[in-house]
Amino acid sequence: MGAYVTVAKTSDIAVGSFKAVEVNGKRLLICHTEEGFFAVDDTCTHDDGPLADGWLEGVAIECPRHGARFDVRTGKVLCLPAAVDIHSYPTQVEGDTIKVQLTR
């Protein structure tokens, strides 16, 4: 397992919102839900559009282009037109620091 990398402060992301970050060349979304913080790729698998232009509702991120939705906890597709999951990454909070593990 790889090391965790600091990506944001908890105070930077209100519940129900997300923040786009770039870490080691990867574009990620750090999502803050009622269940906690989650990290997923910032690219829709349907048409490679940025999910950061979409919106977060509960634990689902929706792509603004064609309405594909993904579960930010797991990366699983929740509705078409996407058929391929996005990657999710292990996330941990230490104090006010959000960290993500990029390697699997």
Image: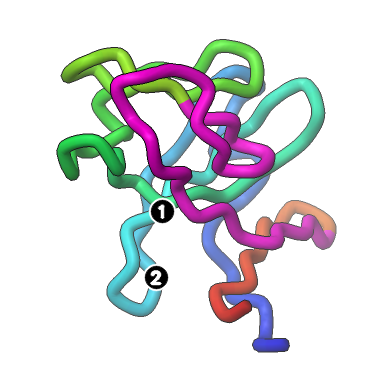
Along the line of sight, the residue nearer the viewer: 73 or 22:
73
Within the magenta stretch, is there residue 84? yes
Name the spot of residue 37 as percent of width and height, x first: 69, 41
The answer to whether residue 3 is above or below residue 46 is below
- Secondary structure at badge 2 equals strand
Q: Residues within 10 Å of mark 2 (few under 14, many from 20)?
A: few
**Which of the 4 quarters of the picture holds residue 93?**
bottom right
Along the line of sight, the residue nearer the viewer: 31 or 12:
31
Q: How is the image coloured?
A: rainbow
**Which of the 4 quarters of the picture holds residue 34?**
top right
Q: Residue at x 45, y 47 (%)?
A: 86
Q: Are marks 1 and 2 in contact (CB under 8 Å)?
A: yes
Side (left or right) of 92 relative to 56: right
Side (left or right) of 49 relative to 90: left
Q: How many marks?
A: 2
- Report the amino acid beneath label 2: Val
Give the residues drawn in magenta, as a range.
Answer: 70-94
Distance (Cα) linking label 1 and label 2 = 7 Å
Mark seen at residue 23: 2
Write down the residue under mark 1: 28
Among numbered discs 1 and 2, the one appearing first in the sequence? 2
- Report the amino acid beneath label 1: Leu
For the C terminus, the image quarter is bottom right
Q: Residue at x 74, y 52 (%)?
A: 96
Name the spot of residue 92 as percent of width and height, x first: 77, 59
Name the spot of residue 53 as percent of width and height, x first: 25, 26
The answer to whether residue 68 is above or below residue 75 is above
